[in-house]
Image (cartoon, rainbow, N blue to C red):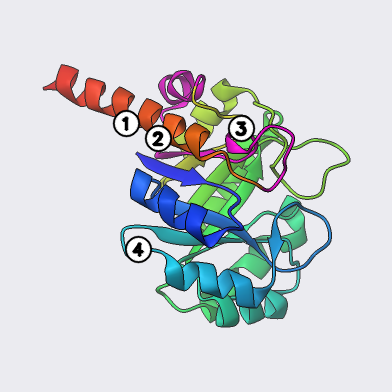
Amino acid sequence: MIIQIYAFTDIEQAQQAARMGVHQIGFVAGDYGVVPGEMSFEDARELVISLPSIAHSVALTMATDINEILHMVHHVQPNIVHISTDVYDVDVEALTILRNRLSPSVQLMKAIPVQNEGSVALAEEFAPICDYLLLDTKVTGMPGVGATGETHDWQLSKRIVESVDIPVILAGGLDPDNVVDAIRAVGPAGVDSNTATNISGSSVEKDMRRVKQFVNSVRHFINKTVKSDG
């Protein structure tokens, strides 16, 4: 089970999270003026090179221009590029061009808003181009997909997991208390937390106690499941 946490801005906290067992360390790479925790390319690169080899770096971008995304990748050199714009701001054609121009070593993650029946078709449309899908909550008035702190219809998420052939990471309001219920309901390849692992009242500072609780909840459930299957 992949554990992914957003959105780190502090190198020491990112390193600590990796040592706790967070597999994918997320951060916002770029100055878009629209989402909390945005980092310059230089600072994002410093975070990437600071991570131990056990963790993968995930650079979230709100850019809609392919050349701008490639420019970010060139400077930051993340393991995974997370496209978190409104879905058709980077459509299938653009994502295909991006995939062909990226190094094969760089993986693509596309954020899919889970809203209604159309979300399943949307996921099926983008899955063939991506290495991961991230299922998140879309709130009117907020830019892009995610970072809302709100859950969505997990039954729709489950249908998406069952309908695509790539790993699906479930996001959207997940915290140490509900993440196990989410895993049971959806059966994703991974889980993601952002808002619920921040310090209360802060949109950028991580609560490392909450991060540890999140990791422990997932690990305990997985270990218990493995033992019961054995």
Distance between mark 4 and mark 2 Cα atoms: 17 Å
Q: In this view, does 218 lie to the left or right of 149?
A: left
- Residue nearest the observer in this picture, 153 or 56: 56
Residue type beneath disc 3:
Ala
At which x and y percent is residue 137?
Answer: 69, 35
Q: Which mark is residue 215?
A: 2
Bin the neighbour count of mark 2 within 10 Å (Cα to Cα): few under 14, some 14-19, many 20 and up: many
Instruction: Write down the region rendered in magenta.
Output: 177-204
The relative height of residue 80 versus residue 26 in the rendered view (above or below) is: below
User: Which residue corresponds to the image point at 24% horizontal and 22% vertical from the top-left?
Assistant: 225
Q: Quick one: label 4 or label 1, which is nearer the N terminus?
A: 4
The relative height of residue 23 versus residue 78 in the rendered view (above or below) is: above
Bin the neighbour count of mark 4 within 10 Å (Cα to Cα): few under 14, some 14-19, many 20 and up: some
**Residue identifier under label 1:** 219
Residue 10 shown in magenta: no
Residue type beneath disc 1:
Arg
Q: Quick one: label 3 or label 1, which is nearer the N terminus?
A: 3
User: Which residue corresponds to the image point at 16% horizontal and 22% vertical from the top-left?
Assistant: 227
Residue type beneath disc 4:
Pro
At which x and y percent is residue 222?
Answer: 29, 28
Per the image, label 3 sits on a secondary structure element best described as helix
Q: Residue 52 carries which label?
A: 4
User: Which residue corresponds to the image point at 43% horizontal and 48% vertical from the top-left?
Assistant: 17
Q: Residue 196 carries which label?
A: 3
- Residue nearest the observer in this picture, 159 or 29: 29
The relative height of residue 150 versus residue 67 in the rendered view (above or below) is: above
Tell me if residue 106 can be seen: no
